[in-house]
Image (spheres, helix red, strand yellow):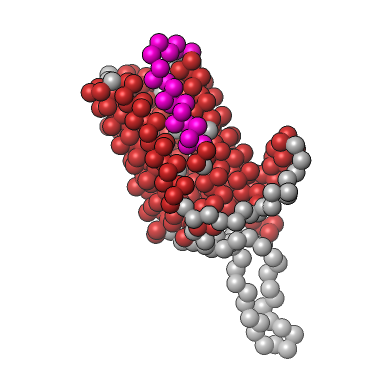
Amino acid sequence: MVACDAVRAVLVAAMTVPGMPVAALVLLLFAATMFASPFESARASITPGMLPGERYALGTAVIQTSYLTAEVAGAAAGGAAVTFFGVRPSLLVDAATFVASGLLIGLGTRARPAAARPDAGLGSPLARAAAGLRLVFGDPALRTLVLLGWLVVFYTIPQGIAAPYAARLGGGPIATGLVLASTAAATAIATPLFSRFVSPRRRLALMGPLAAVTGATLVLTALRPSLTFSLVIFSVAAASGAYQLAVNTAFVVRVPDERRAQAFGIASMGIVVAQGAAFVAAGAAAQVVTPASVIAAGGGIGAAAAVALTLSWRRVTSAQRPPAEPAAQPSGRPRARLAEPVLDLVGPRV
């Protein structure tokens, strides 16, 4: 994590070199963004060790809320910094934030033993990647959870085409900012509430339905709502995306400790690649049809996929449920009822 922050600080600082061509800036930005995936994978692998049991779900909610709050504040602060100080000073401040992050992690995190031995590798990098894919997609439960997580690609399409959507409604930069802020703010509010007031068992039960709601809500944009109602639609869809907390937690307890970083890396990479492709495709489609139609179509696809994955998840969990106990023993005395099995969200998987 410290190494990723150091590299990103250097890459962002390099953007301030005078006369840097646009193509080079794009490459530097691409390289800096590329290091986000290993950073998040490493963070995901060590967080459960710091926050065992149900504290992991609560901690994840706090982390995600903090991230979204900072994202909203950072966008506003970044725009103000560029306006008052210029692009280069703002990029230098951005580079300094990566340095500060690396120092906080390096000095504020206690060293812990690695989950896997250094000699416990799986061969070449290609062999390790193949093993990770088999781990994630070879297990029906993990595969379903990853695909549920990847549905974020569909309900974040409004963020990718916020500018043309707002322009179609007669709005300018402020309207675009409201579209972006509504999704982040709704997620920042809904996620901690979901973790605080919904039990682990209930979160699992709501995971699939909420995933379907995120997409189905966006279908309402086909009715060409006003900006105000559009913000309501985007906020409801984003708030329903709190189901990702249940997906994240269930995924963690199903992956062995020594493979967690690899599994999260695959999941994170899929989101980054698919989201980038979806934004490009949505932007291109918005040149042909209305942005509202693009958002509605993406929501419809996401909702249909969520329904299919919900059915898949129910089949997986039904197959893992042990047979029902008989009502009574042969002696006629009632038999003690076993605890109803659920996914272990409050401890490591055994």
**Rendered position, 36 above or below 288:** below
Residue 41 image point, x, y percent: 56, 43
Residue 130 appearing in the image? no
Q: Is the magenta stretch mostly helix, strand or loop?
A: helix
Residue 327 image point, x, y percent: 67, 78
- Which residue is rendered at x = 38% and y = 36% of the image? 97
Residue 235 image point, x, y percent: 35, 39
**Rendered position, 270 above or below 293:** below
Relative placement, left or right, of 124 versus 292 is right
- Which residue is rendered at x = 69% and y = 57% of the image? 319
**Rendered position, 97 above or below 113:** above
User: Is residue 19 found inside the magenta-colored segment of the image?
Assistant: yes
- Which residue is rendered at x = 40% and y = 58% of the image? 196
- Residue 201 vs residue 50, the one in the foreground: 50
**Rendered position, 299 above or below 139:** above
- Residue 59 vs residue 14, the one in the foreground: 14
Relative placement, left or right, of 229 versus 8 is left
- Residue 262 vs residue 286, the one in the foreground: 262
Relative placement, left or right, of 50 versus 176 is right
Residue 267 image point, x, y percent: 59, 40
Q: Magenta span covers which residues? A: 4-23
- Residue 45 vs residue 109, the one in the foreground: 109
Residue 84 appearing in the image? yes
> How many numbered badges does the structure rendering display?
0
- Which residue is rendered at x = 25% and y = 23% of the image? 85
User: Is residue 186 found inside the magenta-colored segment of the image?
Assistant: no
Name of the residue lying farthest toward the left: 84
Quarter containing the C terminus: bottom right
